[in-house]
Image (spheres, coloured by chain):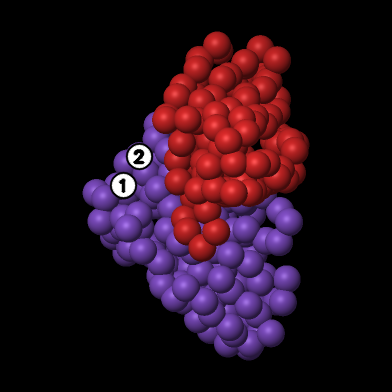
Amino acid sequence: ETGVTQTPRHLVMGMTNKKSLKCEQHLGHNAMYWYKQSAKKPLELMFVYSLEERVENNSVPSRFSPECPNSSHLFLHLHTLQPEDSALYLCASTPDSRDNSPLHFGNGTRLTVT
Amino acid sequence: ILNVEQSPQSLHVQEGDSTNFTCSFPSSNFYALHWYRWETAKSPEALFVMTLNGDEKKKGRISATLNTKEGYSYLYIKGSQPEDSATYLCAFTVTRSGNTGKLIFGQGTTLQVKP
């Protein structure tokens, strides 16, 4: 149990669908992150939220829309995705986004866009 | 463009062998280096966070060293066991503010330990 839970574990969606990824942490952390790992590429930061405020948006296309309703929950809303968006999406948290704490990761959602 | 290089990309060793791999990063404006272990079907797990030149950290049979002047870190595994099989990721940051949020990851070194 990592303390960071992601659902669903696997998701297959068509290009016209709308779906959401969910992340929940019960570690009392104030910062949450979305990372993407495409095949054969390094982990790539997408978004950072600190105390429910977005502090980093790493040039991510608008078809990915994050939401952080409170410091324990983070969503990634997906709409009109492309096949090249198929990847593993990892959520992570830290006590604070400004210190050097290591990331606590969830198990990820494996997304396939058909 | 800031880049992290890890070598080798993959490694196969026999149980009991000791092994090491490298993480290279730009040395200017260095702030911190992280090492993570990522086992198949699990989440990445933090091993070390290192900030000082010459730093050496140890966790059981795994240790890491850091050279910020020349821009590299080594991860060592002594007496590899099958349960050490995983992908080992390193990541670094260069700025003081928003550090963990600005981690830049390498592609990882995948280790397979054969019994």
Residue A88 image point, x, y percent: 58, 65
Res B79 seen here: yes
* Chain drawn purple in the picture: A
Q: What residue type is labelled 1?
A: Asn
User: Which callout, 1 or 2, points at the residue further toward the start of the chain?
Assistant: 1
Depth check: give the residue in front, B21 or A51. Answer: B21
On the image, numbered disc 2 is attached to which residue? Answer: A96
Q: Quadrant of residue B69?
A: top right
- The residue at 58%/19% (across/down) is B66
> Would you place residue A90 above or below residue B59 in this image?
below
Name which residue lies at 66% across and 72% down: A86
B82 relative to A41 in the view: left or right:
left
The tint chain B carries is red
What amino acid type should be assigned to the residue bearing mark 2?
Asp
Please identify the quarter of the rendering in which residue B10 is found.
top right
Read off the chain for label 1. A
User: Which residue in the structure is indicated by mark 1?
Assistant: A30
Quadrant (top left, top right, bottom left, bottom right) of the N terminus of chain B: top right
